[in-house]
Amino acid sequence: MITRPLDLASRLRPSPRNLDALFYVNGGLLVLFFSMFGSRFVLAPGLGVDFRMPELAGAQAGAAPTQRMISVLPSGQIFADGLLNMAQLRVWLKSEAGKLKQPSLLVRASAGVPLSELADIIGAAHEAGFVRVVVGAEETAAGKTGIGR
């Protein structure tokens, strides 16, 4: 053992034999803070750093403000107020559309999302009562610099 040459083990304080009240106070405060200030997205899957929206010339010209937003990954994961499947998304869309006067939705779909899945989501949004559905895209590099217009 590395402590033998210096005899450090004999100078160490012995470990406490009981759990004092401070241990329970600290544990209680941790639970309180996580319940009050925590998020349900802590330790939940989220959008990775490889999330890329499709590029489109003139994307900024078609930009419009929206009231709600969802993100869709190529793996089929849909993030709204957490991770949802298609059936849960329909319920969420209906409840959110009922809260607003002129509901509008932004769909942030990754570049690899199939068009059929995107069409299903847009159709479900219109069925739920969303007046406007905007599909997000990034401006191309040529569109940002003015080249190619």
Image (spheres, rainbow, N blue to C red):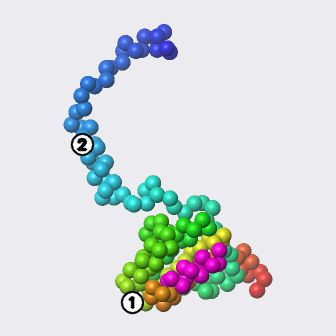
Does residue 53 appear in this view?
no
Number of numbered discs on residues: 2
Instruction: Please tell me which residue is depicted at 30% across the width and 58% down the height of the picture.
Output: 36
Q: What element carries label 1?
A: loop
Instruction: Name the residue carrying label 1.
Output: 101
Comparing 149 with 120, the one in front is 120
Instruction: Name the residue carrying label 2.
Output: 25
Q: In this view, does 37 lie above or below 92?
A: above
| Image location of residue 101, percent across then percent down | 39, 89
Q: Is mark 2 on a helix, strand or loop?
A: helix
Give the magenta range.
114-125
Residue 144 is inside the magenta segment? no
Residue 124 left/right relative to 117: left
Is the C terminus in the top left, top right, bottom left or bottom right quadrant?
A: bottom right
- Mark 1 to mark 2 CA distance (whole Å): 47 Å
Which residue sits furthest front? 87
